């Protein structure tokens, strides 16, 4: 898990890497995005603005081709992260949605609090969920993990 303190922190660590530059562009556009409306930048990322209360049903969620990045625009969100290995699947992996869900684990996983302005990059080998009482305004990003970028983008 990587928690960036700010966009500037993210930019300092990933300048020049196309997919991260595109993420920064999406973050710059965040406040003009209407909630629930998806946007994309080629095949390398999709993003939308959402209230944390609208996300999830309590299950742990994981992806294989696109990494989840959560940017908190307002409020704060507590996110539970659990390594995917050994989890009990609730739904099988779908290649169409790049999504699979898992049962929560007894004792829980690592919990990180992400505050306004911070950005959490969920590791691709982890499942995640947020606490149901969270009311944060988020930019949810799915960022490709298939190399730095696509050759034709």
Image: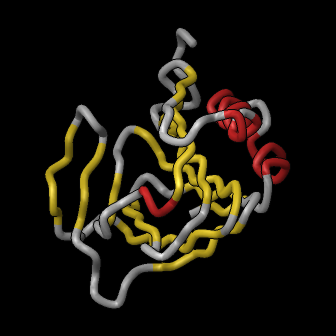
Colour scheme in use: secondary structure
- The residue sitting at 66% across, 63% down in the picture is 3
- In this view, which residue lies farthest toward the front? 34
- In this view, which residue lies farthest toward the top? 152
Taking depth in this image into account, of 28 and 9 the one nearest to the observer is: 28
- The answer to whether 109 is drawn above or below residue 31 in the figure is below
- The residue sitting at 80% across, 43% down in the picture is 11
Where does residue 85 sit, x and y in percent of width and height? 28, 66
- The residue sitting at 47% across, 46% down in the picture is 67
76 on left or right of 89: right
- In this view, which residue lies farthest toward the bottom? 107
Which image quadrant is residue 88 in?
bottom left
- The residue sitting at 41% across, 80% down in the picture is 109
- The answer to whether 24 is drawn above or below residue 124 in the figure is above
Where does residue 100 sit, x and y in percent of width and height? 25, 52
| Numbered marks: total | 0
Which image quadrant is residue 15 in?
top right
Q: Quadrant of the C terminus?
A: top right
- The answer to whether 64 is drawn above or below residue 38 in the figure is below
30 on left or right of 148: right
14 on left or right of 40: right
Q: Quadrant of the N terminus?
A: bottom right
């Amino acid at each position: 898990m990587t928690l960036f303190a700010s966009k500037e922190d993210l930019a300092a660590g990933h300048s020049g890497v196309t997919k991260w530059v595109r993420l920064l562009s999406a973050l710059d556009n965040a406040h003009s995005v209407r909630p629930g409306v998806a946007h994309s930048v080629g095949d390398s990322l999709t993003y939308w603005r959402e209230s944390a209360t609208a996300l999830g049903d309590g299950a742990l969620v994981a992806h294989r081709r696109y990494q989840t990045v959560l940017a908190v625009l307002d409020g704060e969100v507590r996110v539970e992260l659990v390594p995917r290995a050994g989890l009990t699947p609730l739904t099988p992996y779908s290649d169409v949605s790049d999504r699979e869900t898992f049962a929560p684990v007894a004792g829980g996983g690592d919990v990180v609090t992400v505050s306004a302005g911070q950005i959490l990059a969920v590791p691709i080998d982890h499942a995640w969920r947020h606490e149901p009482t969270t009311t944060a305004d988020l930019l949810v990003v799915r960022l490709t993990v298939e190399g730095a970028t696509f050759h034709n983008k």
